[in-house]
Image (cartoon, grey):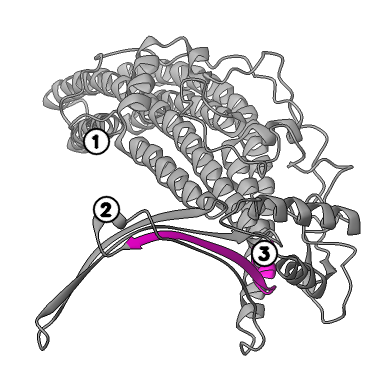
Amino acid sequence: MYRNDQLPTGIFSFCRPVLHFHVAKKYITTTVGYKIIKGNDEVMAENFYSTRNNCYPGHSLFPVTAQMVLMVLMVTLLCGCTPREKRILAPMDLPAHFSRPGKVPFQASWWLDFHDANLVLLIDQALAENFSLHLAREKIQEARAVARQAGASLFPTLDGQGAITSTRNITENSSSDNFLLGLAASYEIDLWGRLRNQRDAASLDAQATEADYHTAAVSLAAEVAIIWYQLVESDLQQDLLVQQIETNAKILELISVQFRAGQNGIADVLQQRQLVESNLGDMAILRADIQVLKHQLAILTGVPPGTLKLPERVPLPTVPPLPETGIPVDVLRERPDIESSFLRLHAADSRVAAAVANQLPKLSISAELSTSGDRSRDLFNNWFSSLGANLFGPIFDGGLLQAEVDRNEAVARQLFYAHGQLLLEAIGEVENSLAREKEQQINLRSLETQLQYASQTIDHVANRYRQGAEDYQRVLLALLSQQGLQRNILTGRRQLINYRISLYRALSGRLPLLEPTKAPSSNAKPARGSNQ
């Protein structure tokens, strides 16, 4: 993440070709937006001579002539580059701390804090069997394969050839055969880092895909927990509604007896019947919700809906103590979605560098070694070898290559600002969860106090109603208020748990149970714990 005192001052720094005849004082960087690497004449010469020695070993089949060395030297001298830097300031300063620091250490397997064995089993099964998570894991393998493809361009290619040709002269009624065996090698010298930056970009993409996998795992665990406690609440709501239906049915029976005795009117009976029917309708909706929640849990855990075995009734847990929220920059550094965004930003920087290097001349060498003969036994008597160097570069392309540079710059800027937006949203998620949990606790205490008053009210008006001193309308209103508060308290307790789960998700880094095989190594990835 970006520390307050170490925000990046620029995001791009790269080279452009010029036409004057000298070796440039600076050359293209590899991590453009975050670390500017400068070179001098001696470094470039050292790199060149090292490359030359590797490409032209002293072997009798491949003599190195002074003309070839001179040609490569001229290429290097002709292809100087000058730096051009664009500055894009960081979009924000991060706060020094969150609004509500907790005292309990935060653990990555946060669901263990609820001390709910059923939740632990469900999340473990989801992390092991969820098909969307399997899909995300396979995307890692795909991205790693792409990274290996990009890295292969840094190595020479070696191809073998074998041929047998038979030629017949029909006019002279004669024929001849030719046997050929050969090897062909080619290698592009990565003078300006184009191939290296392409490899780094692909490797960073692979690492970002792995971070996406961990982001999906964190979201999956939170989704399972939220749905599970929705199901627990729905079961408790069903039990409560059964009790309320029984209570309302008894009141209906009492009112009906009083009506037959002429002590009240038919309106009281009809209103109570409507209340009972309303309860029965609510029960039907609640049963459907319970089935839907069970089906959702089954899908998340990788089994067909209707086959997941769940306990019938469990209580809602008490919300654990508030965990340590830590320092925002440290929390955000551990979040896999932030890590993914940061890695993709670095990959975009590498692609900018590669696009600029693509404007410069390219140098490749090729070598062939072959033997041929008219007869197979003469095959290894005649040897042929060739060694060549190929230099090509753009002279006029109608602005095509520059347009590609501009496109990559625009993509990198988009990712830069998207990364800043993601940082703000991540901080907002933590602060929103803290604020909602705090206020929900106050709301829950208020609901419990209201329920006490409502229970006292129903006792009072019910006694007065039995004495004939109160009409039924007051009893009905008090009864509806009491029963509504009972349901709201259950919903409020579950909502408080949801806010805590949201806080855990906002603070969560990589889950310890999910560590796929490491991505291909690359120096392009910033060290974990660096200023992102």
Residue 441 at x, y percent in the picture:
60, 24
Judge the density around disc 3: few (<14), some (14-19), many (≥20) Cα neighbours within 10 Å: many
The foreground one among 296 and 518 is 518
Highlighted range, magenta: 353-372
Residue 399 at x, y percent in the picture:
64, 86
Q: Of the two numbered discs 2 and 3 on the same chain, state the one appearing first in sequence.
A: 3
The foreground one among 19 and 446 is 19
Q: Of the two numbered discs 1 and 3 on the same chain, state the one appearing first in sequence.
A: 1
The disc placed on residue 377 is 2
Q: Is residue 365 part of the magenta span, yes or no?
A: yes
Quadrant of residue 355 within the rendered picture: bottom right
Q: Secondary structure at mark 1?
A: helix
**Three-letter code for the amino acid on which mark 1 is drawn:** Val
Residue tagged by mark 1?
A: 292
Q: Quadrant of the C terminus?
A: top right
Is residue 520 among the parts visible in the rendering?
yes
Q: Of the two numbered discs 1 and 2 on the same chain, state the one appearing first in sequence.
A: 1
The foreground one among 288 and 131 is 131
Q: Is residue 198 part of the magenta span, yes or no?
A: no
Q: CA distance from mark 1 to mark 3?
A: 49 Å
Vertical relation: 504 (above or below) 30: above
The foreground one among 345 and 38 is 38
Vertical relation: 46 (above or below) 403: above
**Three-letter code for the amino acid on which mark 2 is drawn:** Arg
Is residue 463 among the parts visible in the rendering?
no
Answer left or right for 233 relative to 23: left
Residue 318 at x, y percent in the picture:
50, 13
Residue tagged by mark 3?
A: 352
